[in-house]
C-alpha cells in the first residue's frame, strides 16, 4: 500500500509539487476574488492535493502547504493568523492531518463544517463519502471514481463556501487512520 | 445538550449568563457544535449513552476570571472540568469525567511568564503548549532543553499534572517530578502559591519547591482538589552534545543482568532514557516470528533460549543517549562498555555519531527521533496509529494500558504473561510475549504497555472495554496497577490501590470533602467523588 511514509521515501514533498509547477512552500494566491475569503491548505506529498491547490489558488486568499508537517504550519503560521481573524479554511489533506487540525482548531474556536472522505483502494478506485452538507451531494456525481478529483473539488469551492454552518455529522467523524489497504484523503472546510 | 447534574435548564442558563458576564459572551460555548469540540476523540464510549459529554465550556483569560467562575460554580453547584490544551488523547482529551460538567478551558491563559537559562526553569500558564515554549526558547536563544511528550501539542502544565512523561534524563522526563512551584485557585476561589512562592516578594519560587511544613503540590496532580493556574518547570541546561549508543546481549537469560547494569547507570544519572528492545523477538510494532513458539502456551526458558539461538540475533538490546560535553560522553561510553563486558559475556556495542547541540533549525526536519532531543512534534501519530499490529483493521484511537512493574526481568515477564492471558481470555490475539520489553518513562519503574483499540463502533468498543477491564483485574491479582488511564477506567484503576480496605481513597475523599465542599471540581476524577455524589459514584 502506498501511504504517506512510502510516498515520502519515494521522493519527498518537492517531487510531486514540481510536477505541477507549485513550489513546495506557502504561496501567495494570485486572485482573491471569492466572495468569502478563505485559506486553502494542501499537502504537496499527494498529487490529488496538489491538483486541488493548483485549481483553487485563483480564488483562495492564500495557499499553504503542509509539507508533511502540520505542526510547523499550525504553530508557525496558521494559528496566529486565525487568532486575529477566523478566516475559513478549506483543504484536501490526509485523514490524519484533518484529525490533528480538528483538535488544534479548538484553540481558535473553529470546527469542521464540511467533510468529504476519499478512500482510494490499491487499484486506484476512489470512493467519496460526504458529511456535513447534504445540499452538495449531487455534485459528487461529477467526481467519478478515478484520479483527478482534487481539481474538481477545488472548482466546487464556491458551493462549499455558501454554507459554513457547523454540522455535527461532520465533526470528529473518524480517528486518524485510513481503512485497511486504502489511502484516505479528505476534502474539508473548517470555519 | 447535557445539563449539569441536579440543575434545571433555567438555572443553567442563569449560570451561563453569569459566566458570560465574567469572560464575555465570545468565551462561553454552549451550542451543540461548540460543545462537540470537547468530545474525546479516542473515547471507548463513543456515541453511547455513557459517553462523557460536557454541558458547555468557558474560557477565562486570567486568574481573576478563574476565581470568579469558581465562585459562580459554587453558587449553582455546577461541576467544572479544567483543561489546559485538552489534547491528552487516550486519557480523555478535553471531555469531562462527569457528563454535564462545564469544561473550564484554560487555552487563553497561554503566557510564558519567564524562562531563565541560568537557573534553568520556566514559569508558564496552563495554555502554553510544548510547541509554544520550544519556539520561545529558540527565538530568545536560550540555552535550555525541553523534555517533551509524544505528541508535543499538549501543555507542560497539563502533561505534568496528568503525570505525563518524556524521553531525556530521568529527573526531567518525569514531568510532575520536575515541576517547581504551583499557583492554584482553590475550589472556594482562594489563590494559593506553593513552595517559596508563598513568601511575599520571594525570587526563589522556581528554585525551592518545598517551603516549610507539608508540601501539598502532589494533591493537584491527577486530582480534583484545585485549579492550577501557574507552574514552574525545571529545565535541563542545553547539553553540549549527545550520542546514541546501543548495547546488545546474546542470551534470553541475560535480561536481568542487562537491567541491573542499566539501573546502575540510570540511578547514577549517567544516561538518558534507556530503550529496551528484543532483536530476536521483534520490536514493539514489528510482526514477530513467535507464532509457532507460542502455539503451546508460554514457552519455558530452554525453549526461549533455543528460539533466540535459531534467530541468530541478540536476545536483548538497550539504547540510550549520552548527553554532555564531548569529553564526558566519551569517558562515560568507555566506562559503560567496560562495565557491561565485565558483567555479561558476549555483550556487544554500537555507537552512532556524536552531534552537537542545539540542533540547527535547518537540520530538525530530518531528525528521526525529535522527542529524544526535546523537540516537540506530531510524528507519533504516524508511528502508533498505523503499524503492522493494526494494519488489518486500523482503529479510530487507543486506550493505553500501562502496567507499572518492578525493575526486574521477572517483573517484565510476569506482566507480559498476565496481559497475554487476559487478551486470550477475551478473544484477542496477545499483544505481549516473552520478548516484551519494558518502557522506562519513569526512571524508577518499568512500564509494560499495550495499546487497546477504540472505535466509532459501539460493539467493538464494548469488547475493548471488557479487555481493558480484564487487564486491570489480572495485573492487580499479581500486585500491579496502572498509572494513568481514560476516565472510563479511572474508577476501576484506582480501586486496585485497595490496601487496608481502600484507606487511600477514603483519605482522598475526606480531603475532597474538606477542600471542595460543593464538589464542583472534576467530580469523579480518578475515582474521587464528592460527598453529594458518592453513593451512586456520580
Image (cartoon, rainbow, N blue to C red):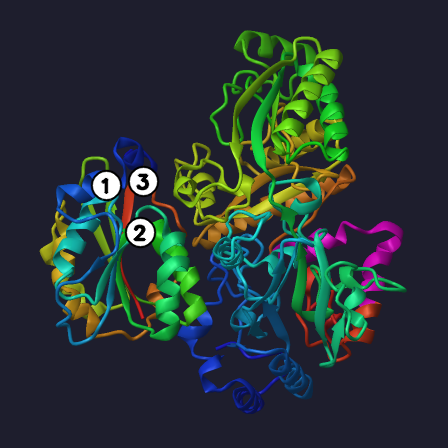
Residue occupied by mark 2: A66
From the image, state whether disc 1 or disc 2 is nearer to you: 1
Q: Tell me: A47 left or right of B478.
A: left
Closest to the observer, B289 or B536: B289
Q: Position of residue A45 (x, y in %)?
A: 26, 43
Q: CA distance from mark 1 to mark 2?
A: 12 Å
Front tag of 1 and 3: 1
In the rendered image, residue B415, in percent from the top left (x then y), is placed at 69, 33
Checking the image for residue A4, the label placed there is 3
Please tell me if label 1 and label 3 are on a single chain.
Answer: yes
Q: Residue at x 75, y 39 (%)?
A: B444
Q: Which residues are magenta?
A: B487-509
Chain letter for mark 1, please.
A
| Labelled pair 1, 3 in contact (Cβ < 8 Å) | no
Q: Which mark is residue A14?
A: 1
Q: Earlier in the sequence, mark 2 or mark 3?
A: 3
Amino acid at each position: 500500500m502506498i501511504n504517506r511514509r512510502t510516498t515520502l521515501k519515494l521522493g519527498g514533498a518537492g517531487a510531486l509539487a514540481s510536477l505541477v509547477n507549485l513550489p513546495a512552500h506557502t504561496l501567495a494566491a494570485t486572485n482573491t476574488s471569492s466572495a468569502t475569503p478563505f485559506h486553502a491548505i494542501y499537502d504537496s506529498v499527494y498529487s490529488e492535493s496538489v491538483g486541488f491547490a493548483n485549481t483553487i489558488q485563483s480564488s483562495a486568499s492564500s495557499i499553504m502547504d503542509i509539507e508533511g508537517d502540520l505542526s510547523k504550519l499550525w504553530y508557525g503560521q496558521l494559528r496566529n493568523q486565525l487568532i486575529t481573524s477566523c478566516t475559513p479554511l478549506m483543504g484536501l489533506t490526509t485523514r490524519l492531518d484533518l484529525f490533528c487540525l480538528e483538535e488544534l482548531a479548538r484553540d481558535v474556536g473553529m470546527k469542521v463544517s464540511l467533510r468529504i472522505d476519499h478512500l482510494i483502494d490499491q487499484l486506484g478506485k476512489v470512493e467519496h463519502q460526504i458529511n456535513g452538507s447534504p445540499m452538495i451531494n449531487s455534485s459528487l456525481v461529477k467526481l467519478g471514481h478515478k484520479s483527478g478529483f482534487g481539481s474538481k473539488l477545488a472548482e466546487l469551492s464556491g458551493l462549499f463556501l455558501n454554507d459554513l454552518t457547523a454540522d455535527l455529522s461532520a465533526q470528529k467523524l473518524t480517528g486518524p487512520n485510513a481503512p485497511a489497504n486504502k489511502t484516505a484523503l479528505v476534502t474539508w472546510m473548517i470555519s | 445538550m447535557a445539563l449539569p447534574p441536579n440543575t434545571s435548564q433555567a438555572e443553567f442558563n442563569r449560570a451561563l449568563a453569569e459566566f458570560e458576564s465574567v469572560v464575555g459572551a465570545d468565551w462561553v460555548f454552549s451550542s451543540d457544535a461548540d460543545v462537540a469540540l470537547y468530545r474525546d476523540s479516542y473515547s471507548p464510549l463513543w456515541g453511547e449513552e455513557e459517553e462523557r459529554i460536557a454541558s458547555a465550556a468557558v474560557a477565562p483569560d486570567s486568574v481573576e476570571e478563574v476565581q470568579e467562575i469558581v465562585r459562580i460554580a459554587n453558587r449553582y453547584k455546577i461541576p467544572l472540568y479544567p483543561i489546559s490544551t485538552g489534547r491528552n488523547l487516550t486519557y480523555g482529551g478535553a471531555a469531562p469525567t462527569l457528563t454535564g460538567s462545564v469544561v473550564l478551558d484554560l487555552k487563553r491563559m497561554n503566557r510564558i511568564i519567564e524562562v531563565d537559562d541560568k537557573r534553568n526553569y520556566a514559569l508558564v500558564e496552563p495554555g502554553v503548549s510544548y510547541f509554544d515554549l520550544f519556539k520561545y526558547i529558540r527565538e530568545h536563544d536560550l540555552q535550555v532543553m525541553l523534555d517533551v511528550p509524544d505528541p508535543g501539542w499538549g501543555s507542560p502544565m497539563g502533561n505534568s499534572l496528568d503525570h505525563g512523561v518524556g524521553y531525556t534524563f530521568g529527573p526531567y522526563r518525569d514531568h510532575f517530578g520536575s515541576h517547581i512551584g504551583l499557583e492554584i485557585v482553590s475550589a472556594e476561589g482562594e489563590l494559593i502559591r506553593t513552595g517559596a512562592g508563598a513568601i511575599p516578594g520571594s525570587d526563589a519560587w522556581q528554585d525551592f519547591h518545598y517551603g516549610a511544613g507539608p508540601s501539598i503540590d502532589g494533591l493537584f496532580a491527577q486530582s480534583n482538589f484545585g485549579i492550577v493556574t501557574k507552574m514552574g518547570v525545571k529545565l535541563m541546561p542545553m547539553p553540549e552534545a549527545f550520542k546514541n549508543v546501543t548495547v546488545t546481549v546474546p542470551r534470553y537469560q541475560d535480561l536481568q543482568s542487562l537491567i541491573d547494569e542499566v539501573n546502575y547507570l540510570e540511578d547514577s544519572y549517567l544516561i538518558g532514557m534507556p530503550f529496551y528492545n528484543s532483536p530476536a523477538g521483534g520490536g514493539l510494532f514489528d510482526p514477530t516470528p513467535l507464532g509457532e513458539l507460542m502455539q503451546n502456551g508460554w514457552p519455558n526458558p530452554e525453549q526461549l533460549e533455543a528460539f533466540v539461538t535459531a534467530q541468530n540475533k541478540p536476545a536483548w538490546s538497550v539504547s540510550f543517549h549520552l548527553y554532555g560535553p564531548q569529553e564526558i560522553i566519551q569517558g562515560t561510553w568507555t566506562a559503560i562498555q567496560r562495565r557491561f563486558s565485565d558483567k555479561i559475556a558476549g555483550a556487544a556495542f554500537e555507537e552512532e555519531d556524536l552531534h552537537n547541540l542545539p540542533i540547527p533549525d535547518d537540520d530538525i526536519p530530518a531528525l528521526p527521533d525529535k522527542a529524544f532531543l526535546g523537540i516537540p512534534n506530531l510524528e507519533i501519530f504516524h508511528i502508533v496509529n498505523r503499524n503492522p499490529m493494526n494494519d488489518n483493521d486500523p482503529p479510530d484511537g487507543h486506550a493505553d494500558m500501562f502496567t507499572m512493574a518492578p525493575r526486574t526481568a521477572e517483573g517484565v515477564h510476569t506482566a507480559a504473561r498476565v496481559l497475554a492471558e487476559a487478551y486470550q481470555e477475551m478473544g484477542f490475539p496477545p499483544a505481549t510475549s516473552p520478548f516484551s520489553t519494558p518502557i522506562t518513562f519513569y526512571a524508577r519503574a518499568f512500564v509494560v504497555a499495550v495499546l487497546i483499540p477504540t472505535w466509532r463502533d459501539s460493539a467493538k468498543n464494548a469488547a475493548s472495554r471488557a479487555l481493558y477491564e480484564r487487564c486491570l483485574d489480572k495485573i492487580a491479582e499479581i500486585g500491579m496497577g496502572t498509572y494513568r488511564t481514560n476516565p472510563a477506567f479511572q474508577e476501576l484503576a484506582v480501586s486496585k490501590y485497595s490496601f487496608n480496605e481502600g484507606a487511600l481513597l477514603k483519605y482522598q475523599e475526606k480531603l475532597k470533602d474538606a477542600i471542595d465542599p460543593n464538589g464542583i471540581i472534576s467530580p469523579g476524577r480518578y475515582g474521587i467523588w464528592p460527598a453529594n455524589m458518592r453513593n451512586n459514584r456520580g
